[in-house]
Image (tube, rainbow, N blue to C red):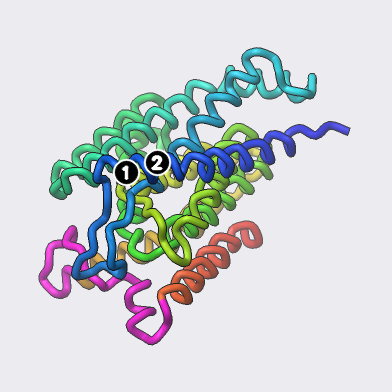
Amino acid sequence: MSLFPDLLYLSAFLGGLICSAGSLPFWRTWCLRTGLLDAPGERKIHFEPIPLAGGFAVFTGLFLPATLGAAVATLGLWPEAGGLDKLQYGLERRGPQLAIVLLGGAAMAALGWLDDRRALRAAPKLAGQTAVALAVALCGLRISLFVPSLLFSVLATALWIVVATNAVNIMDNMNGLCGGVGAIAAFYFGLNAAIQGQYLAASLAWLACGALVGFLPFNFPKAKVFLGDTGSHLVGYLLAVMAILPDFYSPDRPVRWAVLTPLFILAVPLGDMLRVIYVRRRLGKPIHLADTNHISHRLVAAGLSPVTAVLLLWLATAALGAIPFFCF
């Protein structure tokens, strides 16, 4: 009995988890030595500086196994002959796309790192996000939404990447929230791609899921490290791209409503962002100005502990993300 692609998915998940968790102590020490720390402040719930090492660990958990996996396939070291043929064929077809995804992730993480170091203003940060998103779209990774226009496809893709990245970025306001929601969303994107037989897209999602799961014990319930903007930019970007890589509509699945699947999977961060923008506009405040009007903050203000609020939002992500698998 062939173990492909189950062995591939398991290897991706465990590779991401092990590399992320295994590298985190190194990155934590590096952040302490270089001063890359999140200091306590008015809106903060921690009382001592916390290393912003999580993003680097997730980055390691994503890129190191991906590089090793590509090397294994290229050198013909995969244990199953049939699985090796499929893996090499998939890399020939979608390898360039996966390379674009990884390069875009590195660029988005670098932008987040600059924000962690220098607290970039909103305009330069948005310009950097837009540049990365446009580059990814122009390199061929695009959505169409049934509109036969290259310009529309490029602009829609760039807009989606920027919106999803910022939605995840601004949701990173409590221990475990961004990492947990990101892991659940990556799981669902991986499951959808696996069901459609798109094993390379599924492997990338399982890899990201494993990297986030490897990070979570260091961040929740008590944080030894934070994701930082390095991590939240990377996670948001990855989730945006995972919504583009698989085919939600195909001849085997001729349900147009299925293209809405990413909106259900990412309903919590997208809904939180829309709510925050609405509240800030209503109060006459700039939409980029940080505050405590996020759903997580409102749950705590209603009497829940931060841990309970995060767990409730994890549950909401899991419940909403499951809807397309039963309805589409």
79 to 271, vertically: above or below: above
Q: Quadrant of residue 80?
A: top right
Helix, strand or loop under label 2: helix
Where residue 241 appears, as percent x and y from the top left, is 44, 40
Q: Are marks 2 and 1 in contact (CB under 8 Å)?
A: yes
195 to 316, vertically: above or below: above
Q: Amino acid at mark 2?
A: Trp
Q: How many marks?
A: 2
Residue shown at the point (64%, 20%) measured from the top left = 72
Dot 2 alpha-carbon crowd within 10 angstroms: few under 14, some 14 to 19, many 20 or more: many
Where residue 284 appears, as percent x and y from the top left, is 10, 71
Q: Main secondary structure of the magenta part?
A: loop
Residue under pointer 2: 27
Going by the image, does 191 lie left or right of 31?
right
Residue shown at the point (51%, 42%) measured from the top left = 20
Residue under pointer 1: 31
Where residue 58 appears, as percent x and y from the top left, is 45, 43
Magenta residues, start to end: 280-305
Dot 1 alpha-carbon crowd within 10 angstroms: few under 14, some 14 to 19, many 20 or more: some
Q: Amino acid at mark 1?
A: Cys
